[in-house]
Structure formats: structure tokens, C-alpha cells
Image (cartoon, grey):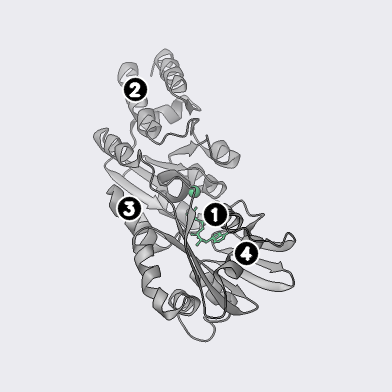
């Protein structure tokens, strides 16, 4: 391959806000056959808003929001900010000194004003209150127990519509669920279309979120495969198992660093993303514009055509 053409390709990419770290990455990028995406913050805007507050009987909406906001206020997780905003919108007083232990991919445990608070996905909250130990299947049990009877169906409908439910328990008792909605990026359909046109036929979504939520987003965008409820290690394994290669992984979060490193081409959405993700990536996109992922492939293909 002619180095001059590569340098021209890399500088053309840079002019479009796309940093390709080396010639090898440019070459692999041109041959990509499968694209894998993180969901939250990559295919969606990653700015979820509280859409529904569903406390159990005896707990008020405000009490549930204030407690969850107190537990989440120091968390860097994308969902955390939404609870704090909701508490502010409601004019609630949020207890400032929470002791918090985050459990990546699951949620967090906190002590707020002497109360033990657990916030996170259904299975995590169910485990924390011993529901699973009592012989009930985790997620179903927590969903069933964590929301008032009449709201179980509403939660299911919202999950099927792509929303996310977070559950909370206080001192071993379920307090309810808070549902959050995050929008699919406006340019996500065009990005997928453009990638298919460039020969990237297979697409995969990898997310820590629930299956119902993930499947809705995948169906909206016509992705060919979905892996939900992934821990960072599951994302790595899923990328390693892809057989149509090279595989490109697109992500933005701290949690995405290992899977970006594991892919043949790791692409970090660097404008809003974590430094750790950018450091593990082969390609960093410096503008908040998902279509540039397809632009990167297109520029690399033109470059390789010139160079060989
Ligand atoms: P993603 O892969 O979509 O970026 P994560 O792995 O960070 O998601 O989280 C997976 C799931 O775990 C979330 O959808 C949420 O249900 C739960 N979770 C993780 N961290 C938190 C948190 N700080 N507060 C509430 N829920 C959380
Ligand atoms: Mg993310």
C-alpha cells in the first residue's frame, strides 16, 4: 500500500472530525463487514428523562424520587442525572451525604440518612432483598413486587416501547420503580442505511439494558442481532464471536473501553464520550454525529481503492 495515499486518507478523515490512529486501522475500516453498537449514548442520545414514577402503596412519588436522587447524585452513570433533574424539577430536598458503592452494569447500594438503599436493574434489586434466595426468579419477582399491581402492565408496555425501568428498595423492602425514556438518535437510521450501502451487512447491538428495551431499539433501526443484559465481559465475548469480519465496535462510555479494544476496529464517539473509550479506540469521532461512522468507512474505502 502506498503511504502517501494513506496519509491523504487520514487527513481527509481528520477534516471530517474523524481521527484514524494508524494505517492499519484505516485498512481494516475499509473492509469492515459487521458493525456492533453500544445502545445508550451511541444509538440513543444518552439523555434519558424520567417518564413515570411508580411507588408501591404507602410510598409517595416524591419520597421515591428524592431517595433515588440522593443515592444517584454522585454517580457518573447516564441514568443518574435524570433522577437528580427530576428531583430538582419537583423542588425536592435531596439528602447530600450518601455513602455509595456502585456495581457497574447493575446499579448501586447506598446509605442515605441511615437507610440502606439499593437502586438498579430488577435482578440486582431482587437479589439485594433476598427474593431470589426465596426461590423466585429474580427479574420477574422484582418487577412483580416492585410496582403496584395495576402498573406491571404499564411497565411492560413502556419497556416494549424502548424505555428503561430502574427499581429501588429501602431497608430490604421494595419502594417501587422509576421509568426513563431515552430517544433514538435522529441520524441513526441514516447511519445504518449508509453502512449497509458500503457493504456492512451485519449489525449487532450490545447493551447492559433489559431485553425488551433493547429489542425495541434494534427493531426500529433494523439491526440484525441484539445482545441485551450484557456485562462488559459479555460485550467482549460477543464481539470476539462475530464471524463476518472485520468487526467494528462503536461506543462512548467508560464501560465500552474493553470491547472497543477487543474489536478489529474500535470507534469511540469522542465528543461526549469518556477518555478511556477514546484511548482504547482505533478511530475517534470528535463531533457528536453518528453518521460520521459511515463517513469513516467511506473515506477508508476510497483511500484503499487509490492505494492498491
Ligand atoms: P449500557 O450497556 O446500556 O451502557 P450499563 O451496563 O451501564 O448499560 O447498565 C446496565 C443496566 O444496569 C442499566 O440499564 C440499569 O438498569 C442498571 N444500572 C447500571 N448502573 C445503574 C445506576 N447507577 N443506577 C441505576 N441503574 C443502573
Ligand atoms: Mg453507552
Along the viewing direction, whichever of 131 and 239 lies nearer the viewer: 131
Q: Name the residue under label 3.
A: 218
Disc 1 to disc 2: CB gap under 8 Å:
no
Q: Which of marks 4 and 3 is nearer the N terminus?
A: 4
Query: Please, what secondary structure does the residue beneath circle 2 have?
Result: helix
Q: Mark 1 points at which residue?
A: 82
Q: Mark 4 points at which residue?
A: 66
Horizontal relation, residue 104 to residue 93: left or right: left
The CA distance from mark 1 to mark 2 is 44 Å
What is the x, y in percent for residue 305? 30, 20
- For the residues carrying marks 1 and 2, which lies nearer the camera in this image? 1
What is the x, y in percent for residue 142? 49, 76
Horizontal relation, residue 40 to residue 83: left or right: left
Q: Which of marks 3 and 1 is nearer the N terminus?
A: 1
What is the x, y in percent for residue 229? 45, 62
Horizontal relation, residue 281 to residue 264: left or right: right
Q: Earlier in the sequence, mark 4 or mark 1?
A: 4
The CA distance from mark 4 to mark 3 is 33 Å
Residue 302 visible to an observer of this rendering: yes
Query: Please, is residue 26 above or below residue 208 in the view?
Result: above
Residue at left offset 32%, top offset 21%? 302
- For the residues carrying marks 2 and 3, which lies nearer the camera in this image? 3
Along the viewing direction, whichever of 232 and 166 lies nearer the viewer: 166
The CA distance from mark 3 to mark 1 is 23 Å
Label tally: 4
Query: Please, what secondary structure does the residue beneath circle 3 have?
Result: helix
Q: Name the residue under label 2.
A: 304
Query: Please, is residue 258 above or below residue 9 in the view?
Result: below
Badge 3: few (under 14), some or many (20 or more) residues near its Cα, within 10 Å? Answer: many
- For the residues carrying marks 3 and 1, which lies nearer the camera in this image? 1
Q: Which of marks 2 and 3 is nearer the N terminus?
A: 3
Amino acid at each position: 500500500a502506498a503511504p502517501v495515499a494513506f496519509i491523504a486518507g487520514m487527513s481527509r478523515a481528520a477534516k471530517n472530525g474523524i481521527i484514524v490512529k494508524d494505517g492499519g486501522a484505516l485498512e481494516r475500516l475499509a473492509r469492515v463487514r459487521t458493525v456492533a453498537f453500544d445502545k445508550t449514548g451511541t444509538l440513543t442520545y444518552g439523555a434519558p428523562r424520567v417518564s413515570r414514577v411508580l411507588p408501591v402503596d404507602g410510598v409517595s412519588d416524591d419520597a421515591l424520587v428524592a431517595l433515588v436522587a440522593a443515592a444517584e447524585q454522585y454517580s457518573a452513570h447516564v441514568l443518574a442525572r435524570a433522577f437528580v433533574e427530576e428531583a430538582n424539577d419537583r423542588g425536592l430536598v435531596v439528602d447530600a451525604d450518601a455513602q455509595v458503592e456502585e456495581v457497574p452494569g447493575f446499579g448501586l447500594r447506598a446509605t442515605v440518612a441511615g437507610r440502606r438503599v439499593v437502586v438498579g436493574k430488577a435482578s440486582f434489586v431482587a437479589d439485594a432483598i433476598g427474593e431470589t434466595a426465596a426461590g423466585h426468579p429474580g427479574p420477574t419477582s422484582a418487577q412483580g413486587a416492585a410496582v403496584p399491581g395495576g402498573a406491571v402492565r404499564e411497565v411492560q408496555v413502556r419497556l416494549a416501547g424502548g424505555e428503561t425501568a430502574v427499581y429501588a428498595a429501602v431497608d430490604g423492602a421494595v419502594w417501587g420503580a422509576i421509568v426513563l425514556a431515552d430517544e433514538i438518535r435522529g441520524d441513526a437510521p441514516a447511519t445504518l442505511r449508509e453502512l449497509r450501502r458500503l457493504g456492512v451487512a451485519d449489525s449487532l447491538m450490545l447493551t447492559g439494558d433489559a431485553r425488551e428495551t433493547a429489542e425495541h431499539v434494534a427493531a426500529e433501526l433494523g439491526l440484525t442481532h441484539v445482545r441485551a443484559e450484557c456485562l462488559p465481559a459479555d460485550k467482549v465475548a460477543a464481539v470476539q464471536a462475530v464471524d463476518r469480519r472485520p468487526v467494528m465496535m462503536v461506543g462512548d462510555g467508560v464501560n465500552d473501553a474493553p470491547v472497543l479494544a477487543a474489536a478489529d476496529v474500535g470507534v469511540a464517539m469522542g465528543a461526549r464520550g469518556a477518555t478511556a473509550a477514546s484511548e482504547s479506540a482505533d478511530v475517534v469521532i470528535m463531533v457528536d454525529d453518528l453518521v460520521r461512522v459511515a463517513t469513516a468507512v467511506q473515506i477508508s474505502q476510497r483511500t484503499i481503492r487509490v492505494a492498491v
